Image: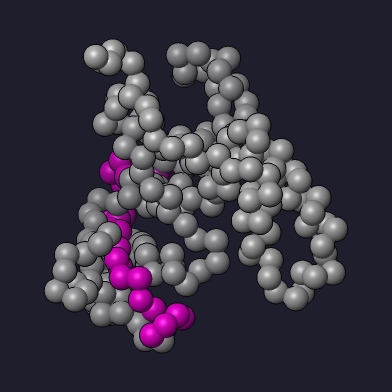
Amino acid sequence: MPDPTQPREGTPSPRLEEAEFRRRFLAPFQDPAFDALGGELDRIAAAAWDAYSHQRKSPRTRKAGPGFHDPGYELATDWIAAREAIEAAQAQHDDATGPNRFLLISGSSRSEHTCPGEMSKSHRLVDLARSVLEAGPDTVVEVLELHRLAAEYGRRIHPCKACFSTAAPLCHWPCSCYPNYSLGQAQDWMNEIYPMWVRAHGVMIVTPVNWYQCPHR
């Protein structure tokens, strides 16, 4: 009988051999404009393989400093910056002399900048809501348009890995799972979204219903 105090393991390893890693790493550079840069790309691919093979998730760190249980612990500078942005947003939220803050979220993946070339009804509803809210006194409205995930270069939201479901201490605020540079899991949009959410006194989420199914976000 397995020991219930030990982590349960057994999923297949996702680790790649160097040849397959290089193939995937270089796959985005198919435009002929990159042909003259083959030598440079080879050197970059070699550096990326070194980071991957040695699993350097957070290559840039600094000591945590005051306010942490272990001030000498090396924290990722990305995580520190995300935390500081959230703390600044919390101060804006708590400022009793500040404006009323609203966050409107358009949950559709459609926009005129990709197929089908027309904005979504969700976006139009968000525009209507924005015009109503901005007509009020002392009001600031932010809009989060999730269609940018499909239309904007490098825009990503990496999935939650549900660390809390295994053990609450594994889950951090903000999330410390990303960025993971060794796996190329960078540019996580959530580090910009967290402060938007924290600043808001009110949040409205407008989502599409595609093919009579529940929204997928």
Quarter of the image for residue 163 reads: top left
The percent coordinates of residue 23 (x first, y second) are 66, 56
Query: From the viewer's perspective, is 186 left or right of 163?
Result: right
Estimate the x, y position of residue 102 in percent, counting from the top left: 28, 58
Q: How many marks?
A: 0
Q: Residue furthest front?
A: 1
Left or right placement of residue 187 versus residue 103 in this view: right
Magenta region: which residues?
87-116
Q: Residue at 68% across / 49% down in the picture?
A: 19
Instruction: Name the residue at the left extreme.
Output: 212
**Residue 67 point in image, percent of width and height:** 47, 19
Q: Residue at x 36, y 43 (%)?
A: 160
Does the magenta run of residues contain 99? yes
**Quarter of the figure with the N terminus:** top left
Q: How is the image coloured?
A: one colour
In the displayed structure, 176 sits above or below 198; it is above
* The magenta stretch spans residue 114: yes
Relative side of 192 to 71, left or right: left
Say which residue appears at 30% left-offset and 75% top-offset.
123
**With respect to residue 15, does 200 lie above or below?**
below
Residue at the bottom extreme of this rendering: 117
Image quarter where the C terminus lies is bottom left
Asked if 6 appears above or below 39 in the picture, the reply is above
Residue 198 placement: quadrant: top left
Residue 7 in sight in this render: yes
Q: Give 97 or 155, whichever is nearer the viewer.
A: 155
Residue 98 appears in the rendering? no
Query: Residue 42's image quarter?
Result: bottom right
